Structures are given as C-alpha cells and as structure tokens.
Amino acid sequence: MEIVTSAHEYIEHHLTFLTAGEGFWSINLDSMFMVWVLGLTFIGVFRYVATKGTSGVPGRLQCFIEITFEFVNNLVKEIFKTEDKLIGPLSLTIFVWVFLMNSIDLLPVDYVPMIARTLGFEHFRDLPSADINVPMSMAIGVFILIIGYTLKNKGLVGFIKELTTQPFTHPLLYPVNFILELVTLISKPISLGLRLFGNMYAGEMIFILIALMPWWMQWALSVPWALFHILIVFLQAFIFMVLTIVYLGMAVEEQH
C-alpha cells in the first residue's frame, strides 16, 4: 500500500480517480459508484415517504420532504408557465440529486478514501460533482431536452427561424444571427456544467489544503469554511435546477 509522504503526494492521491480503461473510453468508477448510491438513496427515501406518509401530523422526514417538494413545485410554477408533466419531477430530481452529491464535500476529506483503502482501493474520490464528467453529462442531458422541447413546441422551421432571424432582422445578416445564436445555444450546457464543477472542485481543494495544515489550524479554518460551504452546496444545486427550468421555459416560449 502506498504511503503518502509529502504534501504533493497527498494532494495528488486525493485528486486521483479510481479508473477503469484508458483514454477517452476510461470510466471513473468512484464517481459512478457515488452517483448511483446517492441516486438510489434519493429514490429510496422519497419512495418510502410517499408510501408510508400520513395525512395527519407528519414526522420530521415527511415534513422535510414535503417542504422540499413544495419549494421546488412553487419555483417551477413561477418560472415555467406551460403545463408539462416532466418539468416538475425533473427539477426535483436535479435539485435533490445535485444537493446530495455536493453534500459529500462536507464529510472529512480523508474519511471515505480511508474506508476505500481498507477495502483495497488505493484511490477513491468521493465527490462526484468535482469530476468534470458528471456535471457535464448532466448538462448535456439538459441540452438534449432543450433541443427536444424546442422542436416539439416550435418545429424544425421555427427552430431554424429562432436561430437566424434575431437579433438582426435584415436577411443579409441571417448568417451572423445564426453564428451568434448557435454560440449562445452551445454555451448553455457548457456554462451549466462548468459552473457546478468549478465551484465544487475549488471547495474540495480548499478542504484538502486545510487538511495539510497543523491540527490547530485545521480546527480554526475547517469549521468556518464548512459552514460557508453549506451555502455553496445548496446554492449550486439551486442554480443548476433554476437554470434548467429557465432554459426549458425559453424552449417552449415564443420569441418576440
């Protein structure tokens, strides 16, 4: 078993994925494992509350789930003005799933990797939202939905008109419009994924750097940063959900 002897080796160890395969076709098994575990946890808890919930005085878990549901539901009604059966469950899934993934960063930085090492895995990164593949795959999924909703509600001709007839109205400037609108369209999933990845990766790095400090500095710095990071954990899940609703809302609304 590898012994970490320097700050460089410690940081490199914590930033190395448990990977299968090589190159483009490699898979980060630790990220996939955490994504599936947290996704199944989300489904299991919400399923349990839905089947065991009471119409009387709710328990703490049921009350928390109901508050979360109402929070997301009210937000969807305010932003997405069209009736749709998918947007509500999609928004709830994105918010809770991303929040759970981000919350892993609040665990002690050595806790999960230490458990993984006792099981024989030399490397294990437990924060899936700090793996660029996870936020970008979710963003690409949202991008596919944007294209699908646009084609469904506006048709292929309407989609092409949306890309070519604005902001400039003169026909000679339609190619310029197309380039500008195409860049805007493609920037949506890129900014959506990179925003989540960048914030969570930075937060993970700060926790790792704090762990390299003397014990008394770790206590002095880790607690305030963890308290502040709780806001980041919630805020990044909230932003990802809101932008998804906004982008899909723009896909079904007529441009004026």
Image: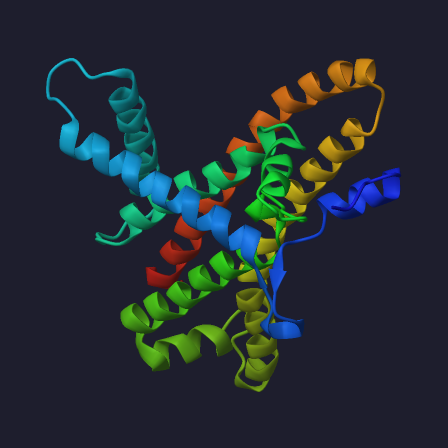
Q: Which quadrant of the structure image shows residue 3? A: top right
Residue positioned most to the left: 55
Q: Which quadrant of the structure image shows residue 249? A: bottom left
Q: Report the residue at 71% width, 21% height from top.
A: 222
Q: Is residue 189 visible?
A: yes
Q: Is residue 204 above or below residue 153?
A: above
In the displayed structure, does residue 256 sit left or right of residue 47? right
In the displayed structure, does residue 58 sit left or right of residue 67? left
Q: Is residue 36 above or below residue 233?
A: below
Nearest the eye: 86 or 52 = 52
Q: Position of residue 71 (x, y in %)?
A: 33, 31
Q: How many marks?
A: 0
Q: Is residue 75 above or below residue 132?
A: above
Q: Is residue 243 above or below residue 139?
A: above
Q: Position of residue 231 (x, y in %)?
A: 57, 27
Nearest the eye: 184 or 168 = 184
Image quarter hosting the C terminus = bottom left
Q: Report the residue at 74% width, 46% height from top.
A: 1
Color theme of the render: rainbow
Q: Report the residue at 79% width, 42% height from top.
A: 11
Q: Is residue 255 visible?
A: no
Q: Report the residue at 49% width, 46% height from top.
A: 34
Q: Position of residue 236 (x, y in %)?
A: 54, 39
In the displayed structure, does residue 41 sit left or right of residue 172? left
Nearest the eye: 195 or 30 = 30
Q: Position of residue 185 (x, y in %)?
A: 53, 67
